[in-house]
Amino acid sequence: MIEEIKKIFIEETDTDLKIIRAELVKESASSGLSISVLEKVFRTMHTIKGSAPMFGFPHLTKIANPVARAFEIFSKSDNCIGAQVIEKTTNAIDILQEALHSDEEHLPGSAEEHLMMVDYFNDICKTNQEADD
Amino acid sequence: MAKTVLIVDDSESIREVVNFTLQNEGYDVLVGVDGEDALQFLDGRTLDIVITDLHMPNLDGLGLIRKIREIEAYQHIPILFLTTESQASKKMEAKQAGATGWIIKPFVPAKLLSAISRVLR
């Protein structure tokens, strides 16, 4: 039964990641990201953060966590989301999707690449926290 | 007589794990896919406990708790949040809205069952 639920997790997470990736690309080409898309990205990453370890994918949280925190901030602020953020987020989505379909117990790509990605999103959170203080 | 649990989460895999865990322990389980969907079960029927996620589309966990507490039949029903959220401010907000307790995801089934037993005692 747990294996069946694991398959459900992989499928629904993959679908959610595909949806937000498509919406990020689509909306960024027009007038910028809507609150709805920002919130969707936040919720997807937030869900991965809490669920992935339960289904054998604890390594996904390494990226999902900082992206979730950054998009929680974006969804509550008036700041415009730049092209670089969108690019980094789609890169993060690509890594998560690849990890979902791999038997490896670590993220695809190099540790250095992951660290840079995590630092990028953590810096966004830090900058916004300092702005609030 | 079996206790009835309403579980509310927009993640299918989480709903399946919680449902499986609770049914194995002999609970009757009702399932909502988000806060809006869960409202259909607040029709005066017997509910012994509600377990809900926080961040959901349409109607989130906080909104759902407020709606539940407006209904006389459910004003004192235990409501547990089952969520990844760990911020103290959110917990305070949930408590003020009427939440009974908080279980952090990821969770092990034994912890979920123990939390439920504690509030149902």
Image (tube, coloured by chain):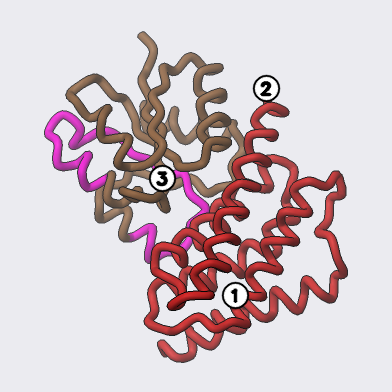
Chain colours: A red, B brown
User: CA separation, marks 3 and 2?
Assistant: 24 Å
Q: Is residue B17 above or below residue A75?
A: above
**Closer to the camera in the image, B51 or A72:** A72
| Amino acid type at mark 3 | Phe
At label 2, the amino acid type is Met
Please state the total of marks drawn on the protein image: 3
Q: Is residue B87 magenta?
A: yes
Which residue lies under the disc numbered 1?
Answer: A86
Respond whether the residues carrying marks 3 and 1 are from the same subunit. no
| Residue at x 38% of width, y 41% of height | B34
Q: In the drawing, does residue B65 fall left or right of residue A106? A: left
The C terminus of chain A sits in image quarter:
bottom left
From the viewer's perspective, is the residue at label 3 or at label 1 nearer? 1
> Which residue corresponds to the image point at 37% horizontal and 29% vertical from the top-left?
B6
Mark sitting on residue A1? 2
Residue B64 horizontal/vertical position (percent):
28, 45
Spot the residue most to the top. Answer: B1
> Mark 3 — residue?
B81
User: Are the two marked residues, 2 and 1, in contact with CB atoms closer than 8 angstroms?
Assistant: no
Give the residue at the far left of this rendering: B72
* Most foreground residue, A4 or B61: A4
Where residue B69 sits, quadrant-wise, is top left
Residue at point 52%, 53% (across, down): B84
Name the residue type under label 1.
Ile
- Region rendered in magenta: B65-92
Residue B118 placement, left or right of B73:
right
Q: CA distance from mark 3 to mark 1?
A: 32 Å
Establish if B57 lies above or below B115: below
Q: Earlier in the sequence, mark 2 or mark 1?
A: 2
State the residue in front, A86 or B31.
Answer: A86
Mark 3 burial class by Cα count in 10 Å: few <14, some 14-19, many 20+: many
